Image: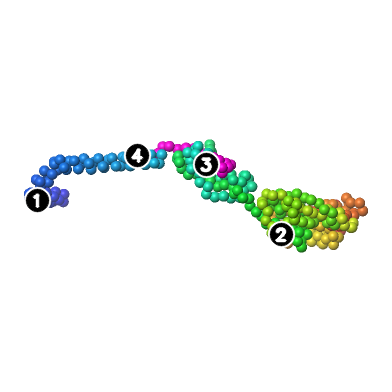
Amino acid sequence: MLKFLSIGIVVVFVLVIVLFRKKIKPFFRFLVSKLFIFNLILALLALFLIPYFTLKYLDTYTNHGVKLPTPNFIGTEVSQLEKLASDSDIEVIINDSVYSDEFPRGTVIRQDPRPNSENYPSFVKPNRKIYVTIVKQAGEYKAIPDLTGDYRISKKIAKVRLEMLGFKTRFERKTSENNYVIELQYKNKKLNKGDKILKGETITIVHGSGNGGAPVTLQNVVGKTVDNARQILTLSNLAVDIEYEGENISAEDSSNFIISVQNPHPRSLPESMIQSGATIYLVAKKGVPVADSTSVD
């Protein structure tokens, strides 16, 4: 098979020479001409020089082999960013702003890429961009909840709810039959439900003294269910603050819990008498209610 193929190639080559014998001589003369050799040299130079200079340009453009440790801008004020970035041969782009209580306003709290450290090596090329997130210059405003409406709210509960929203709190007491929240104030001005105050500001909780009412007999509710204890104390015009012991407590569970601790206890008061409107602090846990709670400490 290879023999016949070789013979065929030789035959074709001979036929080409015979058919184009008049043009072969001029072609070979052209191959050794000055014009062809000049163009050939130009083509070879272009073939090697263009890729060479292209790669050199890319190395220069991309700063090949040059890298800088990523600077740490976290905690830096916005006003100082431009100078620090210039000193570090880096361009800083602010791409987001958020609210935060952990950093002062106008400071960087995140950056991408992360700063270089022993535990996290991070490097960038000169003149590259670093994207940062800053704390908003204007603080976040929160709406004041309804703490003085139809529901009686103790100062303790009001404090918890306000601090969950990010406010600071202080107390101011006024003479009253109970110690419920009377009003909320900000900079000596009364606050209403829905008023928006800057997060982190101090809200004054004005509450009653709980010593302006007539004395009433305090009942011992230790050993009773939460619902029964709440009913007994409410009928005596006393406020109730209950703490539950346990986890994953449902509303149904909590109403069936048993009072284990009462403060103040009737035995700690002269003749078991207390001012109406006072708050009784109770601790409830799972248990079996007793028929006569007076025998339980």
Q: Nearer the viewer, mark 2 or mark 3?
A: 3
Residue identified by numbered label 4 = 56
Q: Nearer the viewer, mark 3 or mark 1?
A: 3
Residue identified by numbered label 2 = 193
Q: Nearer the viewer, mark 4 or mark 2?
A: 2
Q: In the image, what residue occupies the spot 57% across and 50% down?
A: 97
Left or right, residue 97 beside residue 204: left
* CA distance separating discs 3 and 4: 32 Å
Instruction: For the residues labelled 1 and 4, say whether their Cβ atoms are less than 8 Å apart.
Output: no
* CA distance separating discs 4 and 2: 69 Å
Residue 279's disc is none
Q: Amino acid at mark 2?
A: Lys
Residue identified by numbered label 3 = 82
Secondary structure of the residue carrying numbered label 3: helix
Secondary structure of the residue carrying numbered label 2: loop
Residue identified by numbered label 1 = 20
Dominant SS of magenta comes to loop
Most foreground residue, 134 or 102: 134
